[in-house]
Image (tube, grey):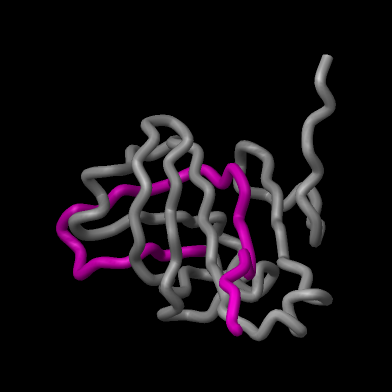
Amino acid sequence: MQVTLLKSKLHRVTATHSELDYEGSCAIDGHLLDMAGIREYEKIHIYNINNGERFTTYAIRAEENSGIISVNGAAAHRVEPKDLLIIATYIAMEESEADVFKPKLVYFDTENRITHTRNTIQAKQAN
């Protein structure tokens, strides 16, 4: 049996552009794609922290080390520049593979610079 797991995540990345008059997709700094293991044209899920919007599109490669996160086309209606986003990908695999699989999680500061990476999600401690 196959299960679907989180493959990678760009956590709290900041939208830099929202381009309605564009063919579509989400342009992401090429270095960030590489760090998260996201392929160009791969299906991505975008979760807008600011307004709660959730949608899917595909990734395209933006200039390396540019910090660009540009939501384009019809999806531009769902994102404003400076919105905080979570961009996630998922993968289907056999349960035996899932037992040892670890996702690539990439975390950011407000300038879309990587602050750290992990392969597990750490729950917040209750006060």
Magenta highlight range: 1-28
In the shown orientation, is residue 8 left or right of residue 43? right
Q: Which residue does the image show at 66% across and 85% down from the upper left?
A: 94
Give the number of callouts: 0
Q: Which residue does the image show at 38% across and 71% down from the upper left?
A: 58
In the shown orientation, is residue 76 left or right of residue 71? left
Q: Position of residue 91 (x, y in %)?
A: 57, 76
Q: Position of residue 6 (x, y in %)?
A: 62, 64
Q: Quadrant of the N terminus?
A: bottom right
Nearer to the camera, 125 or 76: 125
Find out whether residue 23 is within the magenta segment: yes
In the shown orientation, is residue 42 left or right of residue 18? right
Q: Main secondary structure of the magenta part?
A: strand
Vertical side of 52 occupied by 76: above or below? below
Q: Position of residue 45 (x, y in %)?
A: 44, 59
Indicate the quadrant where residue 123 lies: top right
Q: Which residue does the image show at 57% across and 79% down from the upper left?
A: 92
Vertical side of 116 occupied by 36: above or below? below
Find out whether residue 14 is within the magenta segment: yes
Q: Which residue does the image show at 69% across and 69% down from the upper left?
A: 35
Residue lying farthest front? 1
Indicate the quadrant where residue 22 lies: bottom left
Q: Quadrant of the C terminus?
A: top right
Residue lying farthest top? 127
Vertical side of 103 occupied by 123: above or below? above
Q: Position of residue 67 (x, y in %)?
A: 56, 55
Nearer to the camera, 120 or 116: 120
